[in-house]
Image (cartoon, rainbow, N blue to C red):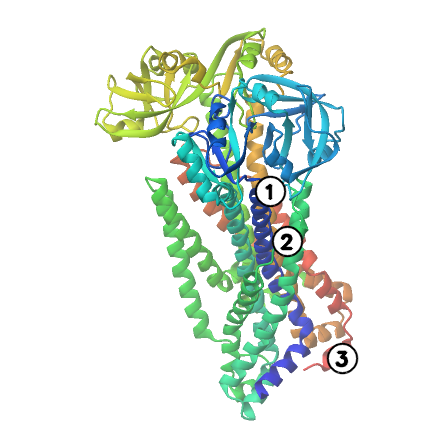
Amino acid sequence: MTVLKTSMRNFFAHKGRMALSAVAVLLSVAFVCGTLVFTDTMNTTFDKLFAATSSDVTVSAKDASDTGETTSDTGRPPVIPAGALGKVRSAQGVKAAEGTVFSTSVTVVDADKDSLSPSSGAPTIVGSWNANDARTMKITSGAAPHGSGQVMVDEDTADKHHLGLGDEIGVISALGTHTAKISGIAAFQVTNPGAAIFYLDTPTAQRTLVGATDVFTNVNVTAAAGVSDAQLKKNVTAALGGAYKVQTAKETADANQASVGDFLNVMKYAMLGFAGIAFLVGIFLIINTFSMLVAQRTREIGLMRAIGSSRKQVNRSVLVEALLLGVVGSVLGVGAGVGIAVGLMKLMGQMGMHLSTDDLTVAWTTPVLGLVLGVVVTVLAAYLPARRAGKVSPMAALRDAHAPADARAGLVRAVIGLVLTGAGGYALYVAANADKASDGSLWLGLGVVASLIGFVVIGPLLAGGVVRVLGAVLLRVFGPVGRMAERNALRNPRRTGATGAALMIGLALVACLSVVGSSMVASATDQLDKTVGTDFIIQSDSGQVVTPQAVQAIKNTRGLERITEYKTLDANLTTPDGKVSKDETINAADPTYAKDLRTKTVAGDLADAYRPDSMSVFEGFAKDHGIKLGSTVSVAFKDGRTAKLTVRAITSDDVVIDKGAMYASIATAARYVPADRMPLDQLVFATAKEGQQDAAYTSLKSALHDYPQYTVRDQTDYKQALKDQIGQLLNLIYGLLALAIIVAILGVVNTLALSVVERTREIGLMRAIGLSRRQLRRMIRLESVVIALFGALLGLGLGMGWGATAQQLLALEGLKVLDIPWPTIIGVFIGSAFVGLFAALVPAFRAGRMNVLNAIATE
């Protein structure tokens, strides 16, 4: 009870000093809980959606996906004959059955040919209005579509794009463009997570999406009273003879949820990883806080020991303070986490993914995990300072106002730090010289962890040298004030090292990812320059295939020297060694593709692979199966017959673009795949006549004006698109890392605030002998800047080392250019100085307001 009272008294006596540590715990716990609540809410939203939209039993084509996605190389969804509907209706236990058609391989545009697709990545769905949809959608204005000239749109899409009744839209599929006017607007009865949905009447949907009125993509079956979904599935399967895919509502919902769940899990664990980084940074803040509090209360602890307190009681007293801190920070963090989740939902709403707070899901495990995690981390972080407090001897404490330094512990720490740093450096060296990326990645992970821990442990040793260098370069120009700031930073290397380490972790990751991202862009750009011999690439950014009409429009464009079509076909390959390689991809293109992509070969000439009944294989595949020039490979095309193709070229694995591709000509594929099952083009390449590139570029864009689903890019555009994609990913990661950096800034603020309290008497004496308030504030700001730059220097150096090593592994995959983004690195370093200035504002202001006489009188 005495220990608890003492801990409570100390905690509330120093509540101001504990506040920033509590905020660090709060932020970290909030990020964990917010992530869990957000992803649980998304799961709930999708569960409700899939449960509501699934019929009791769904019948679809055998080769249709379990999730109902309809993307295919032909641009048309898999279908079943209309005759199957009659068989389903005759099955026992069927109350009703309805044939439907839908497709996600579509683009929908308004009258100005602007896309109406979601910007969030959610699908665009065009389907037939049916009874199953009528259960989940409520028509809020107008009427359901009747006839080919009418279409109905979901309310969210209508609001987002300001669509109203009578507005004309175009549905673009592989069969062409169908225009219709909006006859109705329907609202979801459950939360729509962002999909854009358009409804046509059934005959129009059949003609527009699949090109025939005697087929459906699905048959929705409703069970009669008392018939379970499982029994209904058995009855329907028996009636159809097992020729189709039959799924219950639960199976359909589970398949859809599994598909969405994969994405949500990746997002959840990635965000939790960044929360873990924030926790790691917070540990340094907590250690620093309690170390300084223990140092400031050395005399008090000595008196407690002198009057009979045991080491365990002192130790326990500090740990109870940490427990209180952890509980307060964690409880507030759980509440803040729910707020973060709601904020993320609003943010997703701005991006087009609508999530209702009605579905907000807070599982009981979330607050429990947040509380346990926050408390455990806080108590563990406070263990070392608590142990140090317990070792304070009564007489030593009474003689000295500060805890004596443990020289032996410092030596052991330095040795351990050097060993870990050396081990990390060696692991990075091994990773950089690995022969296989898979082997090197293990060494890279080990090197990152070991070098990070090593730098953290060795931080106090590095602080002495690095701070002196920074002081000589940056602080000496400020005269005596600058020298005092330098000495203050050097006075307690352990504290400076821990404070700098907190900032180091976040900046090391920023530097590493910047180097990797920049090197990827530079390497891909280099590969494009070296290997791509065409001027223009035409493709759909949403994954749609290129229709024959669009290909013809490209061919009719003036100023083009050659046009190359490019398709992909699935096949099973039987190699000379008798092995069967299933689900391989054959890249079928026009012979001119050998000029459009200058792919290196290790044997033969790639142009020969486009001869009749010929193909190429890649180097690794040839080695694995004993294939040489002239070998025959049996190619069983998924949608056609089996061909015997002769290997005329073996391509190098040392490439980035089309790595691992196997080529054949479109003419060869056409001999074995029926025309109606031949995939449409994935891409089309176009090369302008000499000196007509600009005119051809303009003409191509004009020719494809009526095909807004496709984008024309020259090499400059393609490089910029690649750079933008990687840049967006990096910006997202930087945003998540910002939490760790914010916690690190709190650490700098807390360190300075506590050091100001620790040096109260010293500050009073300096003020008494003539140091002005302005000079005092400048001294504290400069101390903060040098600590921040110390952490930045270590972090950026360490991160660039990690990034350079990672690039060496990427070089094994063909990304051979190492590019250090110096503007980013320098910008972060300079930004760290401003972080230091910002962190020092409050401590410097408080120091400047101290009463000189009261400060001198402080013990």
Residue 697 lies, in percent from the top left, at: 60, 14
Q: For mark 2, does the 10 Å Cα neighbourhood hold few (<14), some (14 to 19), or many (20 or more) residues?
A: many
In the image, is residue 799 above or below residue 646? below
User: Given the current orientation, which residue lies at the most extreme left position?
Assistant: 577
Choose between 431 and 700: the one closer to the eye.
Answer: 700
The residue singled out by tag 2 in the image is 360
Location of residue 317 by image quarter? bottom right
Residue 585 lies, in percent from the top left, at: 38, 26
* Amino acid type for the residue under numbered disc 1: Asn
Q: Are marks 3 and 2 in contact (CB under 8 Å)?
A: no
Res 731 label: 1
What residue sits 54% from the left and 24% below the top? Answer: 544
Sequence-earlier tag: 1 or 3: 1
The residue singled out by tag 3 in the image is 854
In the image, is residue 586 above or below residue 608? below
Choose between 429 and 77: the one closer to the eye.
Answer: 77
Sequence-earlier tag: 2 or 1: 2
